Image: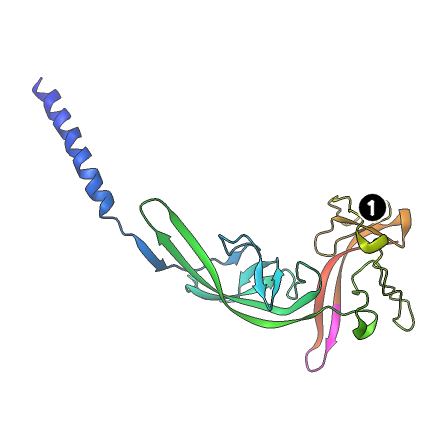
């Protein structure tokens, strides 16, 4: 009987102690080591890619530092493509880099890990067009004809039909797949509703394009999905 009373009292004592221990925990904000890699939408809670020069870029990121653990303020480079294309397809970020501040916020209800972009490097530029300064067709668009001797293809036709508003199939194609004549999105390989010049023989491939940069030599411009014959 005495033992039961002691156990009961011990339990009541714990109930009084636990709130005090919880209140004694540390709340607030503090810096933490950054991660070696970051996903495309790391800047929560906004759930978008990195915004730079008014353009949104969805790409994975990896640390450029060899120091471990990483510092709480750390530089990252775009991967696997160092020159990602903007979500709207109009711009390219050459040698993309982002400086990230890594920190933790803790309160009595939750713990939040923050990864905030605070700096950028590299150059955002319009994507190359086939018809000069007047607008034209992006070189990665279905309407671009690389065999046009003057580079003056039909700039009003993007290869996606009337007004370019044909809905794509949304099929995720992989290299070696036949699309049935549909073109694919350069960044993802998803069917986008464009009409391939290869027709029913359109075969998906993954290619990389290099460009010559004076003083540097050949530099990888970008890699992506295309249809070939």
**Picture quarter containing residue 34?**
bottom left
| Residue 98 visible in this rendered orientation of the protein | yes
Q: Residue at image x 70%, y 52%? A: 188
In this picture, residue 65 sits left or right of residue 23: right
Magenta-colored stretch includes residue 214: yes
Q: Residue at x 78, y 62 (%)?
A: 140
Of residues 167 and 210, the one drawn nearer to the viewer in this rendering: 167
On screen, residue 38 versus residue 151, left or right, reads left
Residue with the most extreme front position = 163
Residue 123 on the magenta segment: no
How packed mark 1 is, by other alpha carbons closer than 10 Å (few <14, some 14-19, many 20 or more), is: many
Q: Quadrant of residue 219?
A: bottom right
Quadrant position of the N terminus in the picture: top left
The reply to whether residue 66 is visible in this rendering is no
Number of numbered tags placed on the structure image: 1
- Residue situated furthest top in the rendering: 1
Report which residue position mark 1 lands on: 179
In the displayed structure image, the side of residue 101 where residue 41 appears, left or right: right
Rendered residue at 62%/70% (across/down): 95
Q: Which residues are magenta?
A: 210-216
Q: Look at the numbered disc 1 and give the secondary structure of its residue.
A: loop
Q: Is residue 45 above or below residue 64?
A: above
Q: State the image coordinates of residue 134 (x, y, percent, origin top left).
A: 80, 72
Looking at the image, residue 22 lies above or below residue 218: above
């Amino acid at each position: 009987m005495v033992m039961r009373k002691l156990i009961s009292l011990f339990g009541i004592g714990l109930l009084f102690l636990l709130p005090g221990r919880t209140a004694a925990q540390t709340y607030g904000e503090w810096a933490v080591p950054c991660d070696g890699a970051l996903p495309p939408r790391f800047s929560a809670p906004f759930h978008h890619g990195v915004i730079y020069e008014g353009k949104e870029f969805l790409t994975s990121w990896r640390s450029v530092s060899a120091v471990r653990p990483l510092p709480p303020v750390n530089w990252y480079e775009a991967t696997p493509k160092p020159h990602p294309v903007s979500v709207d397809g109009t711009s390219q970020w050459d040698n993309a880099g982002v400086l990230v501040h890594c920190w933790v916020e803790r309160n009595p209800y939750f713990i939040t890990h923050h990864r905030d972009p605070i700096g950028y490097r590299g150059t955002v530029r319009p994507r190359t067009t086939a018809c000069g300064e007047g607008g034209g067709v992006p070189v990665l668009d279905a309407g671009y004809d690389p065999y046009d001797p003057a580079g003056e293809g039909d700039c009003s036709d993007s290869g996606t039909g009337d007004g370019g508003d044909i809905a794509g199939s949304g099929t995720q194609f992989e290299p070696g797949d036949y699309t049935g004549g549909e073109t694919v999105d350069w960044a993802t390989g998803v069917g986008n509703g464009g009409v391939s010049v290869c027709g029913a023989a359109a075969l998906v491939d993954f290619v990389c394009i290099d460009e010559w940069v004076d003083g540097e030599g050949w530099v990888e411009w970008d890699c992506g999905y295309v249809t070939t014959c």
